[in-house]
Image (cartoon, rainbow, N blue to C red):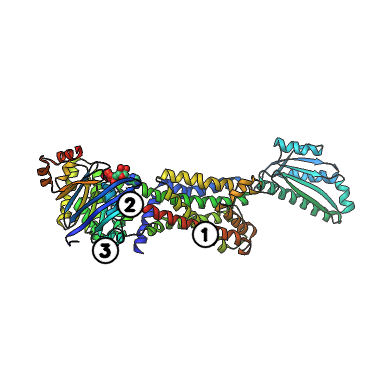
Amino acid sequence: MKKTNVIQVEDLTKMFGDFKAVNGITFEVKKGEIFGFLGANGAGKTTAMKMLIGISIPTSGKAHVAGFDVFTQAEDIKKNIGYMSQKFALYDDLTVKENISFFGGIYGLTKARIKEKTKELIEDLGLQEVSNQLVGSLPLGWKQKISFSVALLHEPKIVFLDEPTGGVDPITRRQFWEMIYKAAHDGTTIFVTTHYMDEAEYCDRVSIMVNGKIEALNTPKKLKEQFQVDNMNDVFLKLARG
Amino acid sequence: MKRFVGFIKKEFYHIFRDTRSLFILFGMPIVQILLFGFAITNEINNVDMAILDHSKDATTKEIINKISASKYFSIKQILERETDIEAVFKKGKVKAVLNFETDFGKNLIKNHQATVQIITDATDPNTANTISNYINSILQNHQQEQNKAIHIDYVIVPEPRMVYNPELKSVYMFVPGVMTIILMLVSAMMTSISITREKELGTMEILLVSPIKPFQVIIGKVFPYIFLSVINAVVIVLLSIFIFKMPVQGSLFLLALESVLFIISALALGILISTISATQQTAMMISLMGLMLPVILLSGFIFPISSMPLPLQVLSNIIPAKWFIIILKGIMLKGVGLEFIWKETLILLGMTILFIGLSVKKYKIRLE
Ligand SMILES: Nc1ncnc2c1ncn2[C@@H]1O[C@H](COP(=O)(O)OP(=O)(O)O)[C@@H](O)[C@H]1O
Ligand SMILES: [Mg+2]
């Protein structure tokens, strides 16, 4: 395993009964990269991600995340990653501040550190007005931004984002990607799934998954060259038609 | 430890910000107690009664006058035959019948002893008891006055008889049942709902991706409910003592230990339910149908187990609540110690260990 690869996956497979939800995928993600994990609904993105974050045991294959084996060192992986699930997941009945201090707490941050981080986060996102409001009362776009910031609270090496921009307007998506860039600039590796093909343009490299298999993997520029089209959506359409 | 404190704080936020939880946790016990509280009346007033006087002498007349003069009773009917007694009760016209034996007055003088039957309608056992006591004291009073006046000691022997509920299944008998239901509700249903809620909302996944261990998540989730269940148990016992006037005969310490054991078994059941249900709705339905119903119907709380058909009697054995109710009745009503309820305790303990084992196993499987 090369030092610069923070995620190294080889022939990873997940079966549900006879069904191969993830079918022998192989790839690696370099440190500090924004890696786009693309695919249509049901392609197997979430299933693959769950194996990498240690909450689903692979049927076969190999995978290392942050240098740890997903089969035997899931607990070590958990300390080094952040995760934002496909289902939006903060506590609606807790205020913004309460959510931050709860999640900070379960990652073992000290009280002082939580206080510092809370202040920073609220300033960065401009949440001064609503920091004592219940999260449930906020618009989805805000919740997603808070959720992302919460996933970064403990300064993980890698952050896994599962369709983080699902269901929000283009302006909010744009702002969200600015946050992703900032995190990447600070040295965090980003592993992000999406089915919005335009978002692929923002990634350093993308893989495109079709029916459990990775059918293409390269920089957006090279992929467009390879398929002789001028946007990622067409790359995807060509792939899907086979 | 610090993580644990934060977790519990969050759990209390959930509970205190949800009206449904609050109602089940604090409203239910109060509602139940009010229901039973209203059913109990320690004061009686103008109770309708009937008299069957086989003697019709001066003494019985005097007693009857005394009774009708008191504000507690009003005599509605004078009966002629024994068979009338059942008829007036059936019609619900009176709550009590006083039945004087033949030659009541003569017997008092001759034998220094005469018998009067006090028959009460015990469908409301508490009232029946009170009526019986009141009549008794009127009789005692009369007897004392007479003894002073004529200097012959005699005794009126009242023979209380309760009809319709001879074993006097009073509100005392219901307290253990109510307590069991509330503890079951709070411990099993509330935990199963609160764990399923995290699954449904997707926050469980976030918790499992964090460095917190799954068993820590579960302990964090159940701890507040242990705490609240214990508070509920204490409130129920206090209310039993102060509102129901029900003395706890046995050791409070033993009562506390047994209650904690039952709470833990209910919590384990709650966790088990949460592992097999995907939504809060399902968890609630399973808790209600799978736990509450058997507790109400099969635990002996309402229907005596001994009068159930054999298959149900057998089935009732696998219900932890049955054993807990026996234990509670033993400690609260009979005042027995562990030496009399060790068997039930052991069964409950075994069940608890089984439920914990099962839920730990089930919970692990869910993660893969
Ligand atoms: N726990 C499961 N049991 C059975 N099938 C599953 C399970 N989870 C996902 N699948 C199936 O695996 C396939 C891939 O799902 P998923 O990874 O969620 O896709 P994506 O995230 O790319 O939309 C889908 O067909 C889905 O129905
Ligand atoms: Mg998905």
The quarter of the picture showing ligand 1: top left
Per the image, the residue denoted by label 1 is: B261
Q: Amino acid at mark 1?
A: Leu
Assess disc 1: are there few (<14), some (14-19) or many (≥20) residues with their C-alpha within 10 Å of its C-alpha. some
Q: State left or right for residue A71 relative to residue B23.
A: left
* Residue at 18% from the left image edge and 38% from the top image edge: A237
Q: Position of residue B238 (x, y in %)?
A: 55, 56
Assess disc 3: are there few (<14), some (14-19) or many (≥20) residues with their C-alpha within 10 Å of its C-alpha. few
Image disc number at residue A112: 3
State which chain disc 3 sits on: A
Q: Amino acid at mark 3?
A: Ala
Of A23 and B305, which appears nearest the observer? Answer: A23
Confirm whether circles 3 and 2 share one chain: no
Q: For the residues carrying marks 3 and 2, which lies nearer the camera in this image? A: 2
Q: Amino acid at mark 2?
A: Glu
Q: Earlier in the sequence, mark 2 or mark 1?
A: 2
Assess disc 2: are there few (<14), some (14-19) or many (≥20) residues with their C-alpha within 10 Å of its C-alpha. many
Q: Position of residue B283 (x, y in %)?
A: 44, 46
Q: State left or right for residue A88 relative to residue B195.
A: left
- In the picture, which quadrant includes the C terminus of chain A? top left
Q: Position of residue B65 (x, y in %)?
A: 78, 43
Label 1 secondary element: helix
* Residue at 75% from the left image edge and 50% from the top image edge: B136
Confirm whether circles 3 and 1 share one chain: no
Label 3 secondary element: helix
Q: State left or right for residue A232 relative to residue B311.
A: left
Per the image, the residue denoted by label 2 is: B205
Q: Position of residue B271 (x, y in %)?
A: 44, 53
> Disc 3 vs disc 2: Cβ atoms closer than 8 Å?
no
